[in-house]
Amino acid sequence: MRKLVTKLILFLLPLIGFAVGVEIIVENIPNSYSYKSNYMTSHAADIKTLVLGSSNAYDGICPYELPNCFNLANSGQALEEDYRLLSMYIDSMDSLKMVIIPLGYHSLLSSQTMPRRLYYTVYMHLYSRWPLSQYSFEAYDMQNALRKIKEYILTGDITRCDSLGQRLYYEGTVDENGERDMQIDFLSHHDSFEITKKRDVIDSCANYLHLIDSICQRHNVRLVIVQMPVLSQYKAQLPVEQIMIQDSLLRSFTPTAIYINASEWPLSSKDCYNATHISDATSISFTKELYEYIIRLTH
Amino acid sequence: MAFNSLTFAFFLPVVFAVYWQLQGHLRWQNAFVVLASYVFYGWLDWRFLGLIVFSSLLTWGTGLLIANALRTQNNKLAKLWFIGTITINLGILCIFKYYDFFVSSLCTLLQIDATKHLLHLVLPVGISFYTFQGISYSVDVYRRNILPTNNLLTFCAFLTFFPQLVAGPIERATNLLPQFDSPRRFHYQEAVEGLRRILWGLFKKVVIADTCATFINPVWDTYSHQPASALILAALLFSIQIYGDFSGYSDIAIGTARLFGIKLRENFRTPYFSRDVAEFWQRWHISLNTWFVDYVYIPLGGSRNGKARTISNTFVVFLLSGLWHGAEWSFVGWGVYHALLFMILLITNRTHRYRNEVATYTQIPQIVLTFILLTMGWILFRAPDIETAWEFVYSMCNSTIFSIPQGIHFTRLVCLLMCIFAMVFFEWRNRTKNEAPIPHSFIVYYVIVFAIWWFSGRASSDFIYFQF
């Protein structure tokens, strides 16, 4: 048995050494998650407006149009992660006045974003690395880890957000004619749900929204829930029942929070990356209008 | 926990080390196997640990009662205990696995609303496997093929041995029980062969099956919008996926057991090198098929009572085999499809043409034809229902057969095809042997480990047969 163990250790040592090396290199490459985590650690006290949410918010809310704002949203960020992030930083955000949570029609369908859990574990420390799992190391996904190292060597930067956290470089998908693909069919199919099949997930998401609401109330912070603009053709393909349920669920927060349904905000395909994501140029005018609307509502 | 998880990578060395520290203490070794097996199973789903303990106690206890009744010539009582244990074991399986299926089918037939009558129970992982293993023990005791064991620990180790607990091979007491009854010594060569087998199994699961799934699943999700070429590619790749997935699992199970000095039955013998469907069924999921032959086909009369009876018995076996896989009409359809293919060979007396011989290069056309027939069957297996399977097959037969599928990552596809080629090459070269077909070379091992690492990512999926 000693012979087997010795040979196995000798066989595994180079592999473990390689994995540790890759892990150290990748974890030290700056990325959007580490940038946002570092920003929150050093600037939390100055933030007056915090944006949470998934890619709709990451693309669609321009932090430069809001007072002392930071966009802490990220692709596929679920409401559970929004809640955990807010809980983590709320005590250090002394100036915080407003939390904005922009939602898409998929937002109440997404529980935890498992494939991205790694980033919330390694860079944002929302979850523990123990017990060790595939979400504890970058090197577990060797293909992705080596791709990051290669991209960093070639470009010198793999951070996808600007200094206030809004996404950079996102262009969506391009079709065979080189035109931006609005992905109306794909996204409406992807975001549609039958209420009976998804009840548990919806309840869980609604629960996290309630928890966020109660944190905001405790800290005297205004919560603004925004149903983000989408292309009308996309919305027309969603089940009517789904739209009604989401609207009434979000409306139920209005005694304490502000709910703004901006899903029918006028949009053309030129204003979007795809059917559910507005472009950075549009995000400026949308955020400006959104802020003016909030000011009108609160005065 | 699953074999392809990081948890198992930590679990296995710990269990291995403790197990061999207990060498020479058989009772403690068996107790540790049972404990490790419960931890393994509980990690997957702790809620059903009670069920597996109950099933173990019931089968062990009734085994002793049956043997006792037989010893005192009280055949009626033995039969009573035997029927009792089979009924309870099958009853549990039926309630968890088939109740909703039969009730909803009946309600559809009677055109009444089924929602009020359904139980919506979660299927305990591996229930079909360990229930069949338990039933085979009871039958063997009742038939006096084996003597029941008095030792509960030995029996629990036999029924719950973690490498084969959740997806087989379905073991027989005649093979496994004596191994847990006798002292086990560590053999270096056995352990090395076990590790090689695990490595090969992981390659088939992670590199072949899981990568195939990344091409197949998007096509199935949107099959009505896909060209025929994409559907054909998905169908062919699913044949490879299910083989890589299930035979990969069996390889890991057999390899893991060898690390513990236990030899499990072979479950696959290069089934896609079969020259007809009859040969395929001698090489695919062998432990289940021999179970059906020994405990269903032969008791029904087998081939002893004329051709008509043989045909009906064969049909029953395939129908049950389909149902065993899942409570869906598509699985029943899959069973019927194979039964029909088998009938053709049965009627023309060609079911035993290739027994005990391996395929040669000149027989490759027959192998390809058989593979195509099997691929058509796998569409039924993969489809959520028969209507979808039919629409999928219908959509495969149109003019878009020559169009290039959209949205396919061609570099990844070429890498996958190279890996499939490597698998076929190694398995063809070693098609007569029951061992990992890879050369004894550290360079090869490193290449395979890197391939597994490269393809694994975070999107690795569960084994398909876990759902059965």
Image (cartoon, grey):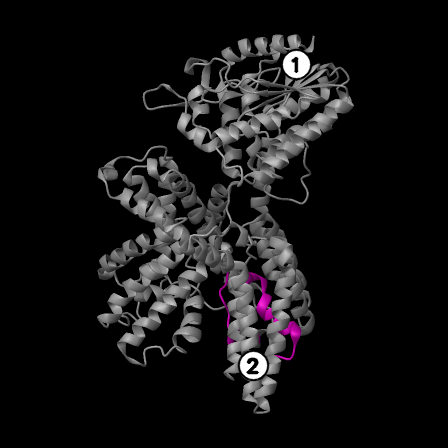
Look at the image and give the residue range highlighted in magenta: B148-177
According to the picture, the residue beneath numbered tag 2 turns out to be B80
- Looking at the rendered structure, whether the residues under marks 1 and 2 are on a common chain is answered as no
Q: Is residue B253 visible?
A: yes
Q: Residue at 49% of width from left, 67% of height from top? A: B170
- B255 or B7, nearer to the observer: B7
Q: Position of residue A271 (x, y in %)?
A: 45, 13
Question: Camera-side residue: B73 or B116?
Answer: B116
Front residue of B350 and A110: A110
For the point 41% across and 64% down, the residue is B321
The residue under label 2 is which amino acid type? Leu
Name the residue at 70% across, 22% down.
A255
> How many numbered circles are shown?
2
Question: Which percent across, then down, holds residue A212?
Answer: 69, 27
Q: Is residue B162 located in the magenta-colored stretch of the structure? A: yes
Q: Is residue A279 magenta?
A: no
Distance CA(mark 1)–CA(mark 2): 77 Å
